[in-house]
Image (spheres, rainbow, N blue to C red):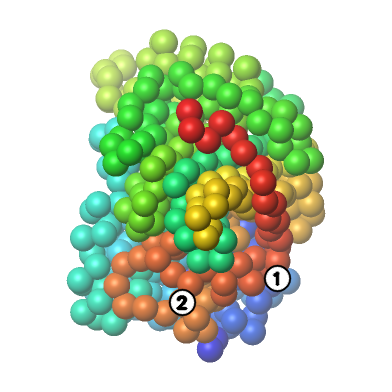
Amino acid sequence: MKGKVLVIGAGAVGQVTTQKCAQFPEIFTEICLASRTKFKCDVIAAQLSRKIATAEVDADKIEQVVALINKFKPDILINVALPYQNLVIMDACLETGVDYIDTACYEAYDAKGFSYKEQWQYYDKFKAKNLMALLGCGFDPGVTNVFVKYGLEKHFDEIEYLDILDCNAGDHGLPFATNFNPEINLRELDQPGFYYKDGKWVEIPSLSMKRDFAFEQVGVKDIYLIYHEELETITKHIPNIKQARFWMTFSDSYIQYLNVFRNIGLTSIEAIDFEGQKIVPLQFLKALLPEPSTLGERTKGKTNIGCIMQGKKDGKIKTLYLYQICDHQDCYKEVKSQGVAYTAGVPPVIGAALILQNKWRMSGVFNCEELNPMPFLNFMGKFGLPWKELEGVEFDIRI
């Protein structure tokens, strides 16, 4: 099947998503890219070898999203806007009868933390209208969830221990910058770490647990335990997991800057009075930091993201490592963006293709580990994300 796709969000990830959709006209017959700032959409559209539509939309306002959907009449909507807007866009898809995909779970503007619970409550509404909502179909979450489901189906009778490792070894040459939306990135880190152990969530101070790991094609890097949203879904949908953790690499310099921002209050989401105006410190900091979509040309190095699983097969203990490596400069040559945006922006295109082709078509609200992993994994190489698997790797699994 072929289809029309509406992409909402024209940041670094939206650029990659649109570029990738444009590469497959046999699947995505028509494309519309929409954002609060139409000029950003037009800049991306000018890079493409085929013509697409662009539009202005405020995704905080359901009436604007509904009007855009009714005008363009897409078969599927890919939401790569801000996670604050997930519920509004889901409501608009329900009102207009369009399938939905996003890459990150909902979080509120004015509250720390994030959870899928509010989006999961849409299950009955989407099922009643024979629509599908695919949540968290980026890389992590997204591909990592698929990796775990593949491991369970093909390699294990049960998975007991899971470590997700996200390494970005890119160097952009700037003192400090984030590789995706600074506000979302810093909110994610400005909270305690959590990991799942023996049926309970264990809380630790932010960035207080540090290890190191030797990543293929990257080398040994410091990794820090943080909470990430796929832990919530994987521990819900994959039975018998005893422990699940998420790790991300940060340089010493990055940690130093982050600590300074915290200590002087720049990561706060509480509005303050400044010369008679209300400003949110984190949003002010975001305005000062480099726009992630401008980092592509100058970023060199690689990403390496994957899952180490330990479990049992036929009564014997087994370990499996599934991972994917991206080169920042290769990504820039292909889609004018760096590797972090590439790894986040390609998976929703794969998900959309599978839904349009009825390979992942179901009614309701789903996370990636609830679906057949093989169609997705078979498409990863075709869409630019070849992956690897390695048996026998261990990473202090039981700590």
Residue type, numbered disc 2: Trp
Whole-percent x, y for residue 3 in the image: 51, 83
Q: Is residue 138 above or below residue 229?
A: below
Q: Which of marks 2 and 1 is nearer the N terminus?
A: 2
Q: In which quarter of the image is residue 39?
A: bottom right
For residue 101, side relative to residue 32 (left or right): left
Whole-percent x, y for residue 261 in the image: 46, 16
Question: Depth check: 285 or 194 in front?
Answer: 194
Residue 2 visible, this orientation: yes
**Residue drawn at (50%, 50%) of the image:** 311
Where does label 2 land, which residue? 360
Residue type, numbered disc 1: Lys
Label 2 SS? loop
**Residue drawn at (57%, 72%) of the image:** 374
Whole-percent x, y for residue 128 in the image: 21, 79
For residue 91, side relative to residue 195 (left or right): left
| Residue found at the very far front of the displayed protein | 315
Label 1 SS? loop
| Residue found at the very far bottom of the displayed protein | 1
**Residue drawn at (48%, 22%) of the image:** 209
**Residue drawn at (48%, 38%) of the image:** 246
Q: In this view, does 222 lie above or below 388?
A: above
Crowd around label 1: few <14 · some 14–19 · many ≥20 (10 Å): few
- Measured Cα–Cα span from mark 2 to mark 1: 17 Å
Q: Residue 382 carries which label?
A: 1
Q: Quadrant of residue 263?
A: top left
Question: Depth check: 342 or 36 in front?
Answer: 342
Q: Is residue 115 above or below residue 20?
A: above
Q: Residue 338 carries which label?
A: none
Residue 59 visible, this orientation: no
Question: Depth check: 4 or 27 in front?
Answer: 27
Whole-percent x, y for residue 66 in the image: 30, 70
